[in-house]
């Protein structure tokens, strides 16, 4: 064992006599007499008696050369740190701080008691449910001030203005602290209530559900003759599980709270590990020691060393020596008051004496060499923490000063950018905004060039409104076309296989894709003939009522109402989304005063009005189509002839005249060999030529119409006429519906007579209302409010820093 340090020569321990008078004044008769004499300041910590404190401005040892200056400088550094934290600036800057973390029930509260002399709240399980900021410093008279710092709301969101509220009056009796801390923590967990309600427990009669944990702080400022200069945060213990009725989310909440503190580079972590439980089962250890960077700024503390099972100390000794789970600042061991001592009312000073006696007389601690004995006891730990913290503050303070100045300049610059605008004529500004909006919307309705490569293909403001509408109209036309009558120019008894049917339909389609592909029921020639015969009343032979054709026409037309309204609904949705985007873009800076909402409401009303008128006209247009009529004679008759020819060709082919029909259709006057026997076609050539002499132009295919008639000829004529009328009517309706929608709805929104610009001018445009409309966006107000709070904190920090540097 190395020789003892000169500072330890003459070391002696004296067991303090038990106190018999517990009613003495906490200031004058609490027995603040040290049980350790002759120790060095570095190794033995703060040691003094009430008498020596009363006559000395600093700790014992300050009469040694340089030590008074050392303690004064350290206290000044911790004072400026405390002042900076009190401004709330730690939310913006990485201020040096010590953070105490540990798993649930590892003795954190007892450790803090042993360093501060306080009696903290104790409960089974988790007793600390919010961060506790402990500010310890030397003072001539013992006192404790408690305050509440609110920097987040109930949901955990940062407040724009940080409040630190005094909680009760200054306490001069340490026995009153525990009760007040319980009340203070309840106040933190119910931030919606007035903190004064908690001072006399009135809060217990107010119904409500408290938070389980909070990020807001209870601040404890303790001064006293035997109090070390120290500044740290005590966080809620890391929990592994919750009891019945508990919230599983609390496990993550507490862990995230701890991480938010220890992630900062200037945070010194005081990791508390209980020797009563296996190290591997303590979540706080895993949280800290898995990160190599955290190991460099962590001090480990082993608690409950008096509860180590017989023969189980070797592992903990290896940690103390740095052989297992080494830390840059090493491990310390402490012994707190046990349950019996607490029940007997053993004082803080007596507990410290018992702790010293325990380590000096109990193996294996008493057998350690000098360097490791220097790490035993809460007093040595407190001295170590104070030294590390003050050194860190000394190193970081110049940088903090520079950062505060730079951040303040940034905040001032941003506040200038966010300065509220000066408005001299609010009516003119609002009216100009409204007129510019209607002009912009008019351009979109008229049609603007689309973007080359739009980032969002669904955004019609960049892809083009009219392009999207035209696509909707084309989809409507395709659906309309598929309602064409699905006639089959053969009887239901004709045996037509699927391949032949497809070939027949392909030949019938030619330039009309709707034939055979639509949504209307299929009808064969004999079914049409049967309907015609059953529909006859007093017509002459060979004549059939017009109602037959009308009924077949309506089979298709009756589907058009739903299709036209589907088209309008699609167009309306496109237009509404487009208008919403234009409103959002144009009035994006005017969300707060109700201007955007007022414009949106009036625009919506205009759209609804135009939509109602348009739907009524679509219904009228549909009703007109329910009565077959056309003046387009030429197109109707030409298409009827074309369809009748095609139907007859198909029918004749299926009647066994396939070869003749095929030959007539394939006949080529310039290459008669293609039709087989050329001599038999010479008459056909002569007939075509003779008819041409009379001015009648025919083709060989037209002679198919001269083939012998059959009993389904009338049906084919009805089918051809119905199909021809459909072609006329569907093209007409397919044009009129989009034209009507465009004129009465799309352009009607911004019509000159009763359009949107007229409707917008009906708004309340008084000067007072326009001033309200022009209120700034909430986001700007929130940012400016937040920056103003940050500026106040930075200025307060700058003032304290300048005062410190001026001395």
Image (spheres, rainbow, N blue to C red):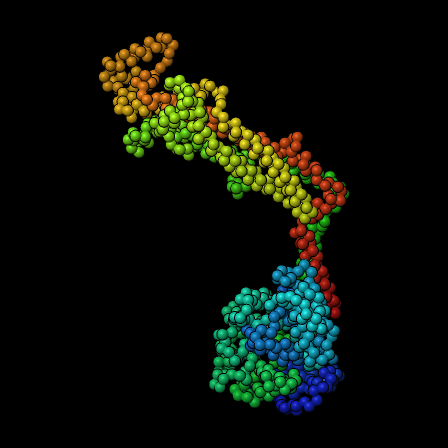
Residue at figure coordinates x 31%, y 11% from the top left: 687
Q: How many marks?
A: 0
Given residues 309 and 239, the one toward you in this image is 239
In this rendering, the answer to whether 435 lies above or below 14 is above
**Residue 462 visible here:** no
Given residues 489 and 480, the one toward you in this image is 489
In this rendering, the answer to whether 434 lies above or below 200 is above
Given residues 763 and 435, the one toward you in this image is 763
**Residue 480 visible here:** yes
Residue at figure coordinates x 71%, y 76% from the top left: 144
Residue at figure coordinates x 30%, y 18% from the top left: 708
Residue at figure coordinates x 69%, y 65% from the top left: 193
Residue 43 appears left or right of 146: left
Residue 104 pos. (x, y %)? 55, 74
Residue 695 pos. (x, y %)? 38, 10
Given residues 609 and 116, the one toward you in this image is 609
Residue 146 appears left or right of 328: right
């Amino acid at each position: 064992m190395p020789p003892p340090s000169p500072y330890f020569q003459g070391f002696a321990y004296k067991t303090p006599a038990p106190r018999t008078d517990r009613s003495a004044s906490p200031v004058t008769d609490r027995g603040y007499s040290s049980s350790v004499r002759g120790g060095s300041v570095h190794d033995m910590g703060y040691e003094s008696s009430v008498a020596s404190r009363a006559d000395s401005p600093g700790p014992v040892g300050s009469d040694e050369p340089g030590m008074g200056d050392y303690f004064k400088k350290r206290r000044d550094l911790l004072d400026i740190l405390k002042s900076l934290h009190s401004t709330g600036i730690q939310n913006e800057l990485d201020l040096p701080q010590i953070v105490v973390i540990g798993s649930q029930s590892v003795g954190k509260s007892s450790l803090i008691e042993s360093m501060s002399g306080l009696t903290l709240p104790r409960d089974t399980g988790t007793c600390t449910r919010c961060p506790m900021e402990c500010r310890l410093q030397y003072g001539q008279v013992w006192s404790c001030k408690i305050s509440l710092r609110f920097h987040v709301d109930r949901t955990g969101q940062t407040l724009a203005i940080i409040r630190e509220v005094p909680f009760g009056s200054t306490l001069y009796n340490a026995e009153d602290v525990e009760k007040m801390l319980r009340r203070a923590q309840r106040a933190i967990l119910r931030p919606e209530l007035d903190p004064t309600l908690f001072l006399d427990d009135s809060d217990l009669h107010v119904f409500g559900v408290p938070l389980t944990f909070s990020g807001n702080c209870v601040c404890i400022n303790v001064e006293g003759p035997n109090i070390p200069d120290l500044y740290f945060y005590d966080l809620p213990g890391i929990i592994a599980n919750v009891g019945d009725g508990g919230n599983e989310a609390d496990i993550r909440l507490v862990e995230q709270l701890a991480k938010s503190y220890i992630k900062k580079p200037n945070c010194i972590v005081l990791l508390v590990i209980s020797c009563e439980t296996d190290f591997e089962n303590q979540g706080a250890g895993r949280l800290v020691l898995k990160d190599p960077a955290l190991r460099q700024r962590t001090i480990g503390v082993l608690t409950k060393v008096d509860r180590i099972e017989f023969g189980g100390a070797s592992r903990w000794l290896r940690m103390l020596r740095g052989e297992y789970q080494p830390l840059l600042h090493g491990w310390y061991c402490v012994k707190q008051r046990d349950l019996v001592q607490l029940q007997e009312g053993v004082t803080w000073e007596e507990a410290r004496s018992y702790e010293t006696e325990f380590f000096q007389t109990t193996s294996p601690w008493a057998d350690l060499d000098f360097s490791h004995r220097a790490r035993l006891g809460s007093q040595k730990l407190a001295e170590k923490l104070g030294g590390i913290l003050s050194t860190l503050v000394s190193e970081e303070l110049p940088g903090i000063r520079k950062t505060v100045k730079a951040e303040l300049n940034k905040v001032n610059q941003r506040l200038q950018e966010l300065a509220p605008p000066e408005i001299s004529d609010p009516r003119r500004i609002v009216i100009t905004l409204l007129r510019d909006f209607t002009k912009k919307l008019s351009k979109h309705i008229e049609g603007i060039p689309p973007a080359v490569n739009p980032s969002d293909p669904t955004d019609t403001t960049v892809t083009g409104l009219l392009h999207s509408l035209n696509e909707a109209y084309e989809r409507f036309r395709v659906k309309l076309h598929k309602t064409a009558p699905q006639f089959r120019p053969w009887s239901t008894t004709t045996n037509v296989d699927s391949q032949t049917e497809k070939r027949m339909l392909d030949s019938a389609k030619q330039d009309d894709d709707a034939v055979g592909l639509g949504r209307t029921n299929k009808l064969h020639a004999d079914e049409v003939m049967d309907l015609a015969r059953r529909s006859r009343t007093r017509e002459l032979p060979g004549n059939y009522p017009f109602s037959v054709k009308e009924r077949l026409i309506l089979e298709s037309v009756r589907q058009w109402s739903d299709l036209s309204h589907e088209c309008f609904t699609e167009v309306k949705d496109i237009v509404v989304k487009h208008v919403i985007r234009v409103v959002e873009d144009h009035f994006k800076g005017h969300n707060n005063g109700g201007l955007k909402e007022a414009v949106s409401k009036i625009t919506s009303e205009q759209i609804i009005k135009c939509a109602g008128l348009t739907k009524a006209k679509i219904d009228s247009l549909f009703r007109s189509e329910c009565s077959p009529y056309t003046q387009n004679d030429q197109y109707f008759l030409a298409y009827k002839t074309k369809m009748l020819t095609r139907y007859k060709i198909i029918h004749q082919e299926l009647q066994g005249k396939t070869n003749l029909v095929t030959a007539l259709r394939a006949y080529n006057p310039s290459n008669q060999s293609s039709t087989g026997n050329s001599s038999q076609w010479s008459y056909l050539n002569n007939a075509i030529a003779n008819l041409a002499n009379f001015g009648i132009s025919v083709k060989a295919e037209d002679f198919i119409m001269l083939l012998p008639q059959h009993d389904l000829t009338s049906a084919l004529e009805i089918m051809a006429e119905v199909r021809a009328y459909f072609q006329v009517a569907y093209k007409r309706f397919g044009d009129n519906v989009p034209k009507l929608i465009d004129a009465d709805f799309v352009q009607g929104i911004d019509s000159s007579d009763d359009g949107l610009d007229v409707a917008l001018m009906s708004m309340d445009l008084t000067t007072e209302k326009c001033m309200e409309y022009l209120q700034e966006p909430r986001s700007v107000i929130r940012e400016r409010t937040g920056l103003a709070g940050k500026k106040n904190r930075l200025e307060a920090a700058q003032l304290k820093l300048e005062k410190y540097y001026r001395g």
